[in-house]
Image: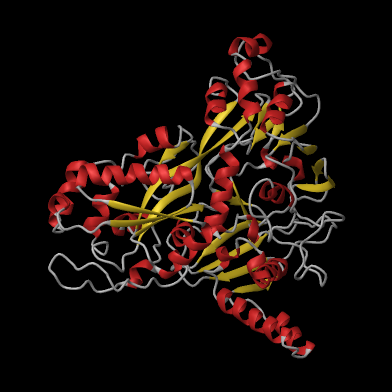
């Protein structure tokens, strides 16, 4: 699932029509600057009301936290529903939301959330701890229909709960009595307890200091569970929500929100209305933005040429996006069971050149697995990483020699598996060229259609495999578990290469199953090689305040306001 989502998102972000390039090429900077002295792209028409018009790559189609997979669906869900916590969209620190405060046990395995008493559903009913219990159980019950269910896996009982539900569903399919299925529905998620209406306790399998950040994700946001929506997606008409906005219109041409009357923080929400505006394509979105009919454009499929033409304008933004393309090792095979070999292969790659040439400047070099290590409390700046895979040819040659392969002598040909994609082949060829020129190692690039690729991944018939992941949260442990999850235990090939000493390398599949809790640990073990992060792009009018860009591509509408007194320079 991770691969599929990433592949679709990447194509979605970088493709565009030839007509867009023609339009942008014809519209010279001089032509644009006649409207606003060249500072902003297009007209700056100050709205009179607190109304925000947003082209977000399409109209939202999903309004259910359990079913929302990517923008614009996740964006509208964040506006309609509120979880225990929310992200500060500037710093990405977890902030109080339905929960006023929280505390953890000393070992970080038990978290207690204290819910505010004035949190209300759009019907006026109070939001309770029981609503969260029932909502999370519903999400797990949905199974594969809910795209981010795996984020709940660290909660005690989550996996066994899913197993019991699937067993009950299979039994029902085999015509077991309705009473058995009713019992399955009565099963409770063991690790989540409603202490009372305003106190929720969550027990984790593994300690997680970032759990308050994790539960800010849309999949943890509560819905008003009824008999009708136990296994069905929430629909737009008469949607019951608990967020800063409520849904007032959802048709093929427009999705409209208004400030929620029953929201506990209503006084702090400036926007009266939000319009998700339908645009046909990137060209249409740019034309509407240029004419002053749209206040922000995000998730538009810009191509590198378009980005270069837009870059000089003050209302254009480019942000590193937490979508990583990387290679993982089959550490069950020698010599890739040797961390010295893995590091040598990792630090000869010229990531800057790959991002600039193969990816046409549309990505960011990834010298580590996560796009940020941490964010300073109350600060805009990201804390620099202390460890990264900077290019170091001399060290790479030394490490390879220490592992018994000086100048690449005796090193087997690397089998690098990629899904069939011209751009990924170009990247793989650039990586292979670095290995050949610096280390004397040859590579066989195996390009397969998606179905065959997945079969080979599951069987472990590779030395390295190209993977991609879109990170959903700032929770370090969850991101690392996703990056290094394996479909199944890889099976070493019968022709596994002998170790430098001549003895057959002992398979170590448990390394491929390793779950890293910190990036520092992942960097020490180097079960994979990060290549590049994607970038996100947006245009935001200068009078729009509080619409923040971040690595999760998750702005918060409740912090946005229109500066009706804005003056152009």
167 left or right, relative to 60: left
> In the rendered picture of this protein, how many numbered marks are placed on residues?
0
Q: Position of residue 247 (x, y in %)?
A: 82, 48
**What residue is at 23 percent from the left and 59 percent from the top?**
412
- Closer to the camera in the image, 107 or 448: 448
For the N terminus, the image quarter is bottom right
Q: Position of residue 169 (x, y in %)?
A: 69, 81
For the C terminus, the image quarter is top right
Q: In this rendering, does residue 376 appear at all?
A: no
Please say which color scheme the image uses.
secondary structure
- Closer to the camera in the image, 192 or 529: 529
Q: Quick check: 419 above or below 297? A: below
Q: Position of residue 163 (x, y in %)?
A: 60, 79
Q: Quadrant of residue 354?
A: top left
Q: Quick check: 561 above or below 433? A: above
Q: Quadrant of residue 287?
A: top right
361 left or right, relative to 202: left
233 left or right, relative to 110: right
Q: Position of residue 362 (x, y in %)?
A: 49, 35
**What residue is at 48 percent from the left and 69 percent from the top?**
109
Q: Quick check: 88 above or below 309? A: below
Q: In this rendering, does residue 99 appear at all?
A: yes
Q: Quadrant of residue 547?
A: top right
């Amino acid at each position: 699932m991770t691969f599929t989502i990433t592949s679709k998102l990447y194509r979605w972000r970088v493709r565009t029509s030839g007509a867009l390039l023609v339009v942008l090429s014809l519209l010279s900077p001089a032509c644009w600057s006649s409207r606003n002295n060249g500072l902003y792209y297009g007209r700056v028409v100050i709205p009179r009301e607190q109304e925000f018009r947003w082209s977000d790559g399409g109209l939202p189609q999903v309004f259910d936290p359990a079913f929302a997979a990517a923008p614009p669906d996740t964006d509208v869900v964040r506006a309609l529903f509120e979880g225990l916590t929310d992200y500060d969209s500037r710093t990405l620190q977890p902030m109080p939301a339905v929960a006023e405060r929280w505390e953890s046990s000393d070992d970080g395995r038990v978290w207690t959330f204290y819910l505010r008493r004035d949190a209300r559903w759009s019907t006026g009913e109070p939001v309770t701890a029981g609503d969260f219990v029932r909502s999370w159980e519903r999400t797990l019950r949905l199974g594969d229909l809910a795209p981010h269910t795996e984020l709940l896996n660290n909660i005690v009982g989550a996996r066994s709960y899913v197993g019991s539900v699937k067993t009950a569903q299979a039994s029902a399919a085999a015509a077991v009595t309705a009473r058995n299925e009713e019992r399955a529905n009565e099963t409770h998620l063991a690790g989540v307890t409603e202490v009372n209406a305003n106190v929720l306790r969550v027990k984790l399998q593994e300690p997680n200091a970032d759990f308050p950040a994790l539960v800010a994700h849309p999949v943890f946001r509560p819905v008003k569970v009824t008999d009708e929506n136990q296994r069905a997606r929430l629909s737009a008409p008469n949607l019951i929500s608990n967020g800063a906005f409520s849904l007032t219109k959802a048709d093929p041409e427009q999705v409209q929100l208004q400030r929620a009357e029953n929201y506990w923080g209503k006084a702090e929400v400036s926007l009266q209305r939000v319009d998700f505006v339908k645009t046909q394509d990137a060209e249409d979105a740019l034309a509407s933005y240029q004419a002053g009919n749209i206040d922000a454009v995000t998730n538009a499929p810009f191509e590198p040429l378009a980005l270069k033409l837009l870059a000089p304008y003050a209302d254009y933004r480019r942000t590193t996006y937490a979508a990583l393309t990387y290679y993982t090792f089959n550490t069950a095979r020698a010599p890739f069971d040797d961390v010295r070999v893995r590091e040598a292969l990792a630090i000869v790659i010229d990531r800057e050149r790959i991002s600039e040439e193969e990816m046409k400047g549309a990505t960011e070099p990834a010298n580590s697995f996560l796009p940020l290590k941490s964010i300073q409390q109350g600060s805009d700046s990201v804390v620099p990483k202390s460890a990264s895979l900077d290019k170091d040819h001399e060290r790479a040659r030394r490490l390879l020699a220490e592992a018994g392969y000086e100048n690449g002598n005796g090193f087997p040909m690397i089998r690098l598996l990629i899904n069939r994609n011209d751009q990924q082949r170009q990247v793989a060829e650039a990586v292979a060229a670095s290995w050949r020129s610096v280390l004397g190692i040859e590579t066989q690039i195996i390009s397969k259609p998606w179905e065959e690729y997945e079969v080979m991944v599951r069987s472990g018939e590779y030395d390295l495999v190209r993977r991609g992941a879109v990170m959903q949260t700032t929770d370090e442990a969850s991101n690392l578990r996703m990056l290094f999850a394996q479909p199944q235990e890889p099976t070493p090939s019968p022709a596994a290469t002998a170790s430098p000493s001549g003895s057959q390398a002992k398979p170590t599949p448990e390394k491929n199953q390793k779950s890293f809790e910190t990036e520092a640990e992942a960097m020490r073990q180097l079960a994979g090689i990060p290549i590049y992060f994607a970038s996100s792009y947006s245009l935001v009018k200068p009078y729009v305040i509080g619409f923040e860009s971040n690595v999760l591509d998750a702005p918060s509408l409740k912090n946005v306001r229109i500066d009706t007194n804005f003056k152009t320079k």
